[in-house]
Amino acid sequence: MKIKILNFIATLVLAVVFSFFLPWWSAMLAAFITAVVFSLKGAAVFFMPFLAVFVFWAGYSFLLANGNDFILAKKIAVLLPLGGSPFLLILVTGIVGALAAGVAAIFGKQCLALVKK
């Protein structure tokens, strides 16, 4: 349990730090690195980075949208089939980033297994 929490925190911190210097895919790089460093087993390989990046992307998009009273988020939510709900757009944004990070973590775990053989 302790290594899962450590993986979650490390993924979250690395994703935030990398986002200052790298483009949007920096969260995937953070998930890949933490999957290599902290060897998790089973579904936790996917779900710990998934949750960390979901918290980061959803929280960050909420902060950005809140800064302008959700004006742009409402307009984008109208363009997408989200019924004009900015909060649903924030949820979708978090899920998209989280899925990509989960897949990157699985890839990191598989690369580690390949190198160990």
Image (spheres, grey):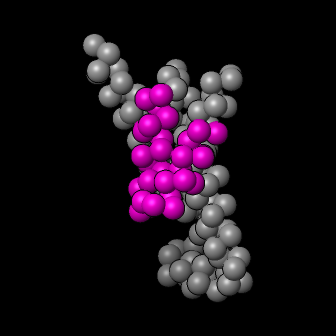
Give the residue displayed 50% in from the left and 22% down from the top: 39
Give the residue displayed 61% in from the left and 67% down from the top: 61
Give the residue displayed 56% in from the left and 42% down from the top: 11
Q: Position of residue 26 (x, y in %)?
A: 44, 53
* Farthest residue, direction top: 117
Residue 88 in view here: no
Of the 4 image quadrants, the one containing the N terminus is: top right
Q: Foreground: 107 or 30?
A: 30
Task: Give the residues drawn in magenta, as a range.
Answer: 9-37
Q: Position of residue 100 (x, y in %)?
A: 44, 49
52 versus 64 height, above or below: above
The reply to whether the magenta stretch includes residue 92 is no
Q: Is residue 16 left or right of residue 115?
A: right
Query: Residue 3, located in which quarter of the rendered image?
Result: top right
The reply to whether the magenta stretch includes residue 33 is yes
Give the residue displayed 42% in from the left and 60% down from the top: 22
Prevailing SS of the magenta stretch: helix
Of the 4 image quadrants, the one containing the C terminus is: top left
Q: Is residue 105 left or right of residue 67?
A: left
Q: Position of residue 21 (x, y in %)?
A: 45, 61
92 versus 69 height, above or below: above
Residue 67 in view here: yes
Q: Foreground: 51 or 15?
A: 15
Q: Position of residue 93 (x, y in %)?
A: 55, 62
